[in-house]
Image (spheres, rainbow, N blue to C red):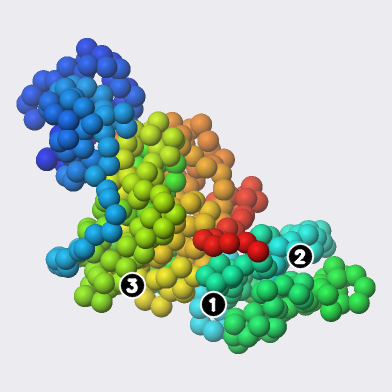
Amino acid sequence: MNTKYLKINPSDNVVVAIQPLQAGESIVIDGQCIDVLQDTPAGHKIMLTDLNAGEDVIKYGYPIGHTTEEVKKGQWVNENQIKTNLAGLLDYAYNPITVNLDIPNEGLTFKGYRRKNGDVGIRNEVWIIPTVGCVNGVANQLAERLRQETDGKGVDAIVSYPHNYGCSQLGDDHENTKKILRDMVLHPNAGAVLIVGLGCENNQPDVFKEFVGEVDDKRIQYIVTQRIEGNEVEEGMKVLRQIYEVASKDVRTDISLSELRVGLKCGGSDGFSGITANPLLGMFSDYLIAQGGTSVLTEVPEMFGAETILMNRCKNQKLFEQTVNLINDFKSYFLSHGEPVGENPSPGNKAGGISTLEEKALGCTQKCGKDYVRGVMEYGERLSQKGLNLLSAPGNDLVASTALASCGCHIVLFTTGRGTPFGTFVPTMKISTNSTLAKNKPTWIDFNAGVIIENEPMEVTCRRFIDYVISVASGEEVNNEKKGYREIAIFKTGVTL
């Protein structure tokens, strides 16, 4: 790979600067010598041909938008000269492709926790989950008290998960809250869960308990603070000590890699995302699926512009139709609020070299590799299908990562070109798209994919990545866990009473 610039696809009419390029420098592409007209930052695009206003800019082999003015060969082009081609709802045709990846099953294992119901966790933590935001303080105190009493030993972590919801919600918002909290209660990364209710909230504890269904009551317990005479924290501690004692006896055993479920997410993307970290996750996703495992792609608005690639990889007509609904339902959500469907790239994305949503989507969707789509899920739905799944959720980092964890993913694999420290309620592994970020933020970044543009073969990087994911699944902490950065966010679409 040229270390200064890269043409990604033979049909592209732009080249990506791998390093900053200076005005007057020459680049040689397909035997043609082109003079760079302006200083161009790393990750940004330079035109390979003259275009008139209204002509398509091609990157990754697909249009990423059209020019809004005349542009010259050698010119630095960005959001100031390129506009999205995206519009409203579309009709789609199913043009299925054949996938034949021929990746061997290596029979690898990790050290995980086999639960009573047969499910597998990669962590053994104690969680305190409020049914409503009114008891967030109680939940936080309970977690802190148990951490102090146990010195944090015996389990992998003791964490409370405060949130704003559980009351004053209607319709889909109320159901979304119930679903995400239920999914957390049932998540196998928790060895024990205490659900803390108030008593008068919309998310009634008794109704929620029925909604969750049958559980191992030696590990999952409820308290309702309005029904407790006296100190609710002391009463809660009595229950917590009991379920902690059970969880503290759990041990790791050998688990087939076929049982690992990973979420695929990106945030703070840059011009290198679609060249390094996202294709790396795609290669890993294909590998994991070949081992019998599962990966989940979400961020539906960041599929706009690349959705037909996913649709044509659907294993059957029904999945295709579900994917069409996944896309058009989210477009309808945007349009119902009077918002355009193509104004997604953030200021950080643009500064990193991403000009349109199509460009972002074509890089974003590379995270799910090349295998068939075998499942499509609604928001809050739990995984039932192995292989590659699509999940309905917005692009917001914490909302989408929470949704990935809630559907049953053990880990969220999060690529970033700008960096972010956050984590959700499962390990949230940060993979940098460039080495500068990895060097500057070592307490944020867990794995550096930037070496791929420094001429480490993708296959070599992927093998190291496979080994690292297995070590994390076996108990090695990622940075968000080391820092205690653990949060949840629930998707809200309606009114608050």
Is residue 317 depicted above or below 142 in this figure? below
Query: Which callout, 1 or 3, points at the residue further toward the start of the chain?
Result: 1
Q: Where is residue 497 in the image (x, y as percent from the top left)?
A: 65, 64
Residue at 27% in and 48% down:
86
* Number of the label disc, if any, that sits on residue 375: 3
Front residue of 198/352: it is: 198
Tell me the distance, in whole angstroms, between the alpha carbons under discs 2 and 1: 31 Å
Q: Where is residue 451 in the image (x, y as percent from the top left)?
A: 35, 38
Q: Position of residue 365 (x, y in %)?
A: 31, 53
For the residue labelled by badge 1, is the local secondary structure a helix, a strand or a loop? strand
Is residue 451 depicted above or below 475 in this figure? above
Q: Nearer the viewer, mark 1 or mark 3?
A: 3
For the residue labelled by badge 3, is the local secondary structure a helix, a strand or a loop? strand
Kindly tell me whether residue 188 is visible in this rendering.
Answer: no
The residue to which callout 1 is attached is: 114
* Number of the label disc, if any, that sits on residue 308: none
Q: How crowded is mark 3: few (under 14 residues within 10 Å), some or many (20 or more)?
A: many
Q: Which of marks 2 and 3 is in front?
A: 2
Q: Residues within 10 Å of mark 1 (few under 14, many from 20)?
A: some
Q: How crowded is mark 2: few (under 14 residues within 10 Å), some or many (20 or more)?
A: some
